[in-house]
Amino acid sequence: MEALRVEGLCKNYGGVRALTNISFSIKVGERLAIIGPNGAGKTTLFNILDGQLRADDGQFFFFGKDISCMPTYGRTRLGLIRSFQLTTLFSNLTVLNNTMLAIHGILPSRFQMFRPIISYKDLYDKAHELLDSMDLWGRRDELVEAISYGEQRKLEIALCLAAKPKLLLLDEPSCGLTTDESKDISTRIRDLGTDVTVILIAHDIDLVFDVAERIIVLHHGEIVADGTCHEIQCNSLVKEIYMGSEATVG
């Protein structure tokens, strides 16, 4: 079953063509990486998929439903969730409160303004589960600004999971992390259940080959390669335009 099908997406910025006839699909539970040089169109593609931008042409289907014109909040409710390259956390709140707010945000009870959020035991239990899965439960009472950047990246993934994603868009999940932190993030992504489909953008090639089952390469807004990790490693065009003609990918 397909989680997402993209058909003929095009996007121009004035006279600059950012995306040209982008078409691909991804199966439920698949791990897909999208790589390419700066300016290849990766972030533009994510911005269209999550509703921040409108494509000039083309359409895309989420579990068979055309969501090309759906607002961002509608896509979120369907289970299309995105993280950003820069963390978007409440730095002056605790790790636990960030998590409980994320869980509460998808529930009907979010409209009950006068009841303390800590009084919802089910939210607390779910927050415990999510933070435990990221080894952050011991940091629950710390302000977000006081924990390490690597821990903030893990917390952001936890908040994405709080929204019960069917498709998770991860934008540079290892950006700014040490080698060990990047390996930890790779493990967290690999260990997500098969009910969560993942598309990630990354310049971290080690993370890409550690996580992805399939890779799409963008160059000047076009798909120039689509295949398994081994196929991308052996693709001479990818070596030439992405890594340099003498380089080896991976």
Image: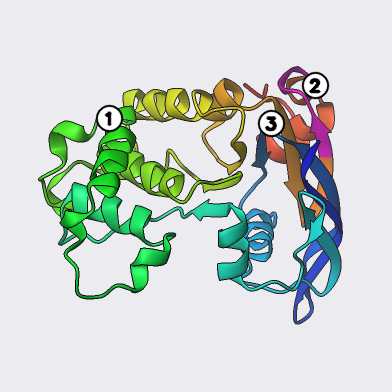
Which segment is the magenta one? 225-231
Going from the N terminus, do you reach mark 2 or mark 1 first? Answer: 1
Going from the N terminus, do you reach mark 1 or mark 3 first? Answer: 3
The residue under the point 82% across, 37% down is 225
Element at label 2? helix
Q: Is residue 157 left or right of residue 66?
A: left
In the image, which is nearer the foreground, mark 1 or mark 3?
A: 1
Q: Is residue 8 magenta?
A: no
Disc number for residue 132: 1
Q: Image height check: is 108 above or below 249?
A: below
Q: Can residue 87 be seen in this snapshot?
A: no
Amino acid type, callout 1: Asp
Q: Is residue 15 left or right of residue 102?
A: right
Q: Quickly name the residue at label 2.
A: 231
Element at label 1? helix
**Mark 1 to mark 3 CA distance (whole Å):** 24 Å
Give whichever of 126, 235 is nearer the camera. Answer: 126
Kindly indicate whether the residue at mark 1 contacts the one at mark 2 (C-beta within 8 angstroms): no
Q: Quickly name the residue at label 3.
A: 30
Query: In x, y percent, where is residue 120?
Result: 23, 53
In the image, which is nearer the foreground, mark 3 or mark 2?
A: 3
Disc number for residue 219: none
Quarter of the image with the N terminus is: top right
Q: Image height check: is 82 above or below 242?
A: below
Amino acid type, callout 3: Glu
Amino acid type, callout 2: Glu
**Mark 2 to mark 1 CA distance (whole Å):** 37 Å
Label 3 CA crowd tier, 10 Å (few <14, some 14–19, many 20+): some
The residue under the point 35% across, 67% down is 110
In the image, which is nearer the foreground, mark 2 or mark 1?
A: 1
**Mark 3 to mark 2 CA distance (whole Å):** 17 Å
